[in-house]
Image (cartoon, grey):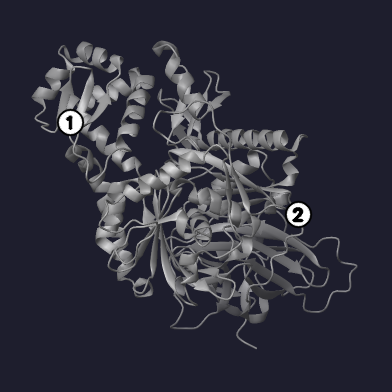
Amino acid sequence: MMESVGVYGFCGCKGKSKIKRDSRWEITAAETAPTSAYSSPARSLGDTGITPLSPSHILNDADPVSDEQTFLVVVAIDFGTTSSGYAYSFTKEPECIHVMRRWEGGDPGVSNQKTPTTILLTPDRKFHSFGYAARDFYHDLDPNEAKQWLYLEKFKMKLHTTGDLTTDTDLTAANGKKVKALEIFTHALQHFKEQALKELSDQAGSDFENSDVRWVITVPAIWKQPAKQFMREAAYQAGLASPENSEQLIIALEPEAASIYCRKLRLHQMIELSSKAVVNGYSASDTVGAGFTQAKEHVRRNRQSRTFLVENVIGEIWSELEEGDKYVVVDSGGGTVDLTVHQIRLPEGHLKELYKATGGPYGSLGVDYEFEKLLCKIFGDDFIEQFKIKRPAAWVDLMIAFESRKRAAAPDRTNPLNITLPFSFIDYYKKFRGHSVEHALRKSNVDFVKWSSQGMLRMSPDAMNALFKPTIDSIIEHLRDLFQKPEVSTVKFLFLVGGFAEAPLLQQAVQAAFGDKCRIIIPQDVGLTILKGAVLFGLDPAVIKVRRSPLTYGVGVLNRYVEGKHPPEKLLVKDGTRWCTDVFDKFISADQSVALGELVKRSYTPAKPSQLVIVIHIYSSEQDDVSFITDPGVRKCGTLRLDLTGTSGTAVPARREIQTLMQFGDTEIKATAVDVATSKSVKVGIDFLNY
């Protein structure tokens, strides 16, 4: 048998851990891993005499995931940075995907199969409305009254940008007031739940129960684990599922959902930008985006039904892929761009994540920020800042006007784009500065933006294209870095999906940079690709077979102390035995391939058969090379507490076996400890928000 190893935290005392010091017991705060490498959590964790029964890892390659519960319908929610929506499919008719019915409101020239991700709370912080309804109601309020209401938009990015995300993280409303992020996300998901159940009930002719629904929520693959967990927590609070029935909710990664949908695409459902082939009669010599415009027109004509048929076949493009072929999914949305590399596994065409998701905050919001910077350059930072606070509804109005013109930007455009300035902007600027908006434009030296007497900013096509450039450059640069990786060099296809993929400027840039390396494909209804893929994922979660672990996971153990190998400050002498404390015992490494449902098992035995409370602390790190739980960046993310009191009458072998299992491969990770003799077990989800 290998050298003895102890898992500390398997302590015989209830409540706080104790250590014996100078013949008396002291209570110590041992719950948090210290930052100093010289202090040791293990020294205060009580009786650590635990040895393994099976020191080596046991990997069960893709244990079948039990899914006892059956659902009548799958509802997927695409919770986007700029717009959101839901779609559903009845499990008896998996080939029919229904996109949510038309929302009230909407903007001319902008598809409203989704609704803006905007939310409005009353002055006493009660939920009022979501989407177009929230935006339009807020806009119609008297400016002084509007200051009392809490209006939030584009708040999803907060989950990506907050380094120390917790359930107490705040968001700031348009009027500057703070509100708990968890509260806002819960309200939004609750609204989707009510809308979807109402629509399902109307269709069924009788009340549809929440228990009949499997929910799928999409999140960016590049989100860190706390953000993904935050979304699940909000869904629990919104009543979509519960911790006891966690299987009712799946957190789907956006590029994976897109990938699942793309594999079903038929030739008439996609545009190929690359010069290597002609699809739908459009060749590369046609204007980039021309085929796309006609495709969108086709989608618009068929919009009334809102039902999409997904044939139970592998699409023509997909059928060209062979075992081991690779492709990239570029998911460009409002807030982030996600790049994921997948590999085909035959015969079923299952997907294997080949290279862990990369990307960054390079979504279409970047274009909005550039527009805001341009306004600051013309009118002054101080004015724009004040205008946003004093006239928040008018600011929203201005950004709506910009959004529709932004969508008209194209590489071959020659005529200018006009953006209407709200009257209150013109009026407030005159009061603020003492001269007119027209005067400001003349003085600003911004040649490519002119003033139109109809009260509009007139932007040259070059000016609009310049607003796109920093964001598109970031995406192209990120893709170039990705294509340098050996795993990615032989990619066959690049699928461009997400709302921002509708932008002809982005299409042209991707085509120019990578058209000679691989074939570039855009699904026709590109803004709904993720939503439809998420429905398909909910119908068959096992379609993703292999993922990359985003983190290294392990538990803290004691190893026999080896002079010269282990640091002196880690020495702990216990009953005459010399131990090295704080050793990080790795279950799985960051970026390691993990099969869906894969289990990593370890077995331990308490040194004292009488020990009845067993505690295991689970740790994680973004680094692969971790030696001790006190290393920088290691954080505690879970605790298994197995209480074996009341089992003393059971026949227990001399060496009690405690089996520890960690299940990987889904977007959530679950850990279990089992007392083999009594089958008593305890489960825990890895928790990144409360440690």
* Tag 1: amino acid: Lys
Classify residue 398 by image quadrant. top left
Residue 210 percent coordinates (x, y): 72, 41
Residue in the image at 34% along x and 32% along y: 404
Mark 2 and mark 1 residues within 8 Å of each other at the beta carbon: no
First in sequence, mark 2 or 1: give its number. Answer: 2
Residue sticking out furthest to the right = 649
Using residue 39 as the reference point, say whether residue 428 is left or right of it.
left
Count of marks, rendered view: 2
Residue in the image at 61% along x and 86% along y: 2
Instruction: Identify the mark at residue 63; answer none if there is no mark.
Output: none
* Tag 2: amino acid: Thr
Considering only vertical position in the picture, is 284 above or below 187?
below
Considering only vertical position in the picture, is 600 above or below 182?
below
Using residue 390 as the reference point, say whether residue 321 is left or right of it.
right
Residue 254 percent coordinates (x, y): 49, 53
Considering only vertical position in the picture, is 529 above or below 48?
above
Q: Which residue is at the front of the view, 442 or 667?
A: 442
Instruction: Identify the mark at residue 377; answer none if there is no mark.
Output: 1
Residue 525 percent coordinates (x, y): 46, 48
Using residue 161 as the reference point, say whether residue 618 is left or right of it.
right
Task: Give the CA distance from mark 2 to mark 1.
Answer: 57 Å
Residue 110 percent coordinates (x, y): 41, 34
Using residue 15 as the reference point, say whether residue 583 is left or right of it.
left
Residue 141 visible to an observer of this rendering: yes
Mark 2 closeness class: few <14, some 14–19, many ≥20 residues within 10 Å: few
Mark 1 closeness class: few <14, some 14–19, many ≥20 residues within 10 Å: some
Q: Which residue is mark 2?
A: 70
Q: Which residue is at the front of the view, 212 or 386?
A: 212
